[in-house]
Image (spheres, rainbow, N blue to C red):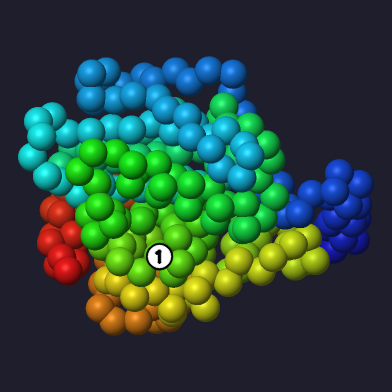
Amino acid sequence: MRHHAKVLIALALSGAALISGCKLDGLVFSADKVDAYSYKSAIIPDSLRREVQFPSSGETLYGMWMRQPGSAPRLTIVYSHGKGTNLADDTPREHTEAMWQAGFDVFVYDYRGFGRSTGTSEDETTLAADAKAALAYALAQPGVTLDKIISYGHSLGSAPAIALAAATPGLRALIVESGFANGQAMAESADPLGIPVQWLLKEPMLNTQRIATVKMPVLIIHGSNDVLIPLEQGLALYSAAPDPKQLRVVGGASHTNIPMTLGASYATLIRTFASFAAP
């Protein structure tokens, strides 16, 4: 009886997905739109943080540029965040604050349809286009060059971050946190009912295949207690990535709390890796 109920729920959700015309199951690919951003933390002074707009394929994307004080040269992280959130929500905010406290300039942006960004994110192609536009914006800032930029993706953001790295030789490095092996694996991990969702995927989001083509140092970070995207998927990414590469499994960490779990060690981890990745 329970099996029949599960099948009926699966069919109902699948039918709803078809009716709505979605390209990915809502559990996997969901935006978080807002009319205005509200920034809660005072870790980064307002004088060192600015909200910006930039174009991407005819849409207007919003981002947050966070710079270090002074004019000394430093590295820049272009951060691609996860699903169902925006650049002012807790997880992107906590991540970018930790990166900024580690001494990096940080640029976080919202994909089309997320936050205040216009348009609709439909598949990995639109995500990759938005990451490319974010990189172009970062490169237009004073003192920023390709060899000083790290592409960093968390969760869903692993797809555009890896795509950006694969398409942009000359980037300093790629960091993937809580990343998935491919779209189907991510969908199955996010789906507690076991719904067969592969036909909802417009594009396969083959992160393992794409990461194998990057030509820069790679750092894979994954929590041992991640139930949304299990550690096995992070290990698959690490296995597929070419050398030089590093793996950090964070004991006790879940899907979103790796910087908080590591504490001061997070800054040491990404600073040391960035130094290792020096051209």
Q: Is residue 38 above or below residue 100?
A: above
Q: Amino acid at mark 1?
A: Thr
Asked if 102 appears above or below 132 in the picture, the reply is: above
- Which quadrant of the structure image shows residue 193? bottom right
Task: Tell me where residue 238 appears, x and y as whole percent.
Answer: 38, 75
Q: Position of residue 222 (x, y in %)?
A: 37, 61
Query: For the point 56% across and 53% down, which residue is it?
Result: 129
Vertical placement of 46 versus 129: above or below?
above
Q: Residues within 10 Å of mark 1 (few under 14, many from 20)?
A: some
Report x, y in % for residue 110. 51, 38
> Which residue is depicted at the point 91% across and 47% down?
19
Query: Is residue 172 shown left or right of residue 276?
Result: right
Where is residue 151, by image quadrant?
bottom left
The location of residue 39, given as percent across then percent down, is: 39, 20
Residue of label 1: 168
Residue 229 can be seen in this image: no
Residue 29 falls left or right of residue 258: right
- Image point (70%, 50%), residue name: 122
In which quadrant will I find the C terminus? bottom left
Q: Visible in this render: residue 209?
A: yes
Q: Is residue 86 above or below residue 126?
A: above
Question: Total number of numbered labels?
Answer: 1
Residue at coordinates 40% horizontally, 49% vertically from top-left? 135
